[in-house]
Amino acid sequence: MDHERENEGLKSRLASAVGMPKDVVLGAAVVTLLGDSEVCIENYRGIIEYTECLIRVQAKGKQIRLQGRHLQIEYYTNDEMKITGTICSLEFCK
Amino acid sequence: MIQAIFRYIRGYVKIRIQGYSPERFLNLCRYHQILIWGLTPRANAYEMYLTLDGFRKLRPIIRKTHTKVVLLERYGLPFFIRKHRKRKAFLTGAVICIGLLFFYSSYIWDIHFEGNDKWTDQTLLEFLDTKEVCPGMPKSKVDCSQIVKDIRAQYDDIVWVSASMDGSRLRIQIKENEDTFREEGAEGEQKAPFKETPQKPDGVEGQPVNGSETLPPTDLVASQDGVITSIITRSGVPKVHVGDAVKKGDLLVSGRVEVLNDAAEVIGYQYQQSDADIFADTQMAYEDQIPLTYQKKTYDPYEQRRLWYIRLGPFRVSAGTLSHDFPKWEKYTEEHQLRLGENFYLPVDYGMICIKSYQTKEKKYPKQKIQEILTKNFEHFSKEMEEKGIQICENSVKIHVYENSAIASGTLYLNQKITETAETEILTIERNEQDESNGSDG
């Protein structure tokens, strides 16, 4: 576990030094929020839970927790997903 | 929008999945590149849209995740065709429709003209008709460059033509030479003989160079009496000056140029076509007479007969009657020809004939009205003169009212072009022979 964390740190520093995008090097999720009505998530692993008021998405190493009302997944593809509705909060948790 | 059209063409379905772990189902769909959209959670289930291709790939995923899939709706063209596959007439109709569309779109159905003021659409259409270019002809027979050449050859004052095909419409853009409009009356008749000459358009400008050989030399003479106010001579020898008084028929510009020797003796002549703008102050008598009374017509809206008709070739169907016994009547005919687009006329006419009865009563113009009519007539006359390029500098027109008529009369002082072409007299020089004999003696 420590080894993994160390590895991540190294990669992060390397990416900063070389100026490469972190979503490519680290596989970090790209979350684009458009006001409180639309979210675009890229670079994710899969859906863990999906209800009208909560969506949990697995990204690399972390979970994205999206809370809101009338949440709906507009589309769901291998690269990207788009969620619409009224978004109240967005959290990253282990 | 485009995406929606593609989805419709390829077909898509709405399904509901429920089971132990529908999220896993979603993730596996993602893994297998199956596009999902419109995903909504329902109590313990999800509803979503899938492409038809995606739906066909679902079976192993369903088995793996132990979920239950319910097909809710089918959308798109593949399902539409399957639903209506027994409607053979409909299918045949659709195929024939598409076939006819292709077939008819290979014909020209309309000819559209742009930029023509002087030559009307009708005139140009009639001309094109003689060249076998008309609505209803196959597109493959249209030769745009030949149409352009034909129009250029036929009409001298069309300086630029472009013909192109827009779908099943032949579009002809024209640029007319606007300068010819004013001199139309004087030069229109002269130009006609040159129209049919076999000279190509690129050779038109070359005429003045060898003009002295091919065209007869001309003088310019005064078309009426006047005092010269300005002379601009382009070719020929001017014989008058500004301020000279000339009479009708006087020589203004001579087409015969004298060739002098060192002793300033005339040894020969060169002939050319004279060309000059000569303006002169002239006078003209103006008279306009109108009677003091007029016949006023009163129409009776109830005393009229109407007949409507539709004519298809030699057959005519009509409704109404024209029989009447009115002492005084007017007949109006209104006829329209059915057409497709702008210029494709069908052999179907429709129209209306109306006979209106009227009574006449003699009435006298009030004095003010007489003045108004005569003034209006004079204004109209002045405008016409101005359009011809004649300037009215002054006038002494007065209105006189007599017992039975009113007359506007007086003199107009004009400034106008007074040139008129006349043939140049060809002179021969007798002295030439003497000179030559002298020369041979010495």
Image: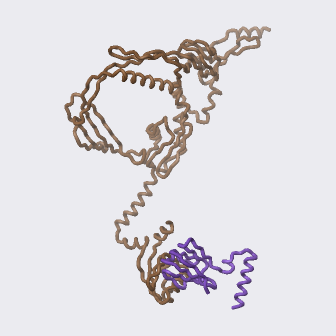
Chain colours: A purple, B brown
In the image: residue B80, left or right of residue B315: right
Expressed as whole percent of the image width and height from the top left, the position of residue B190 reads: 53, 25
| Residue A74 in sight here | no
Rendered position, B163 above or below B158: below
Rendered position, A16 above or below B100: below
Expressed as whole percent of the image width and height from the top left, the position of residue B4 reads: 48, 69
The residue located at (39%, 61%) in the rendering is B96
Expressed as whole percent of the image width and height from the top left, the position of residue B42 reads: 44, 82
| Residue A61 in sight here | yes
Identify the residue at the far left of this view.
Answer: B325
The residue located at (41%, 57%) in the rendering is B100
In the image: residue B257, left or right of residue B336: right
In the image: residue B47, left or right of residue A80: left
Quadrant placement of the C terminus of chain B: top right
* Most foreground residue, B130 or B57: B57
Rendered position, B76 above or below B268: below
Expressed as whole percent of the image width and height from the top left, the position of residue B434 reads: 72, 8
The residue located at (57%, 17%) in the rendering is B280
* Most foreground residue, B188 or B153: B188
* Most foreground residue, B84 or B37: B37
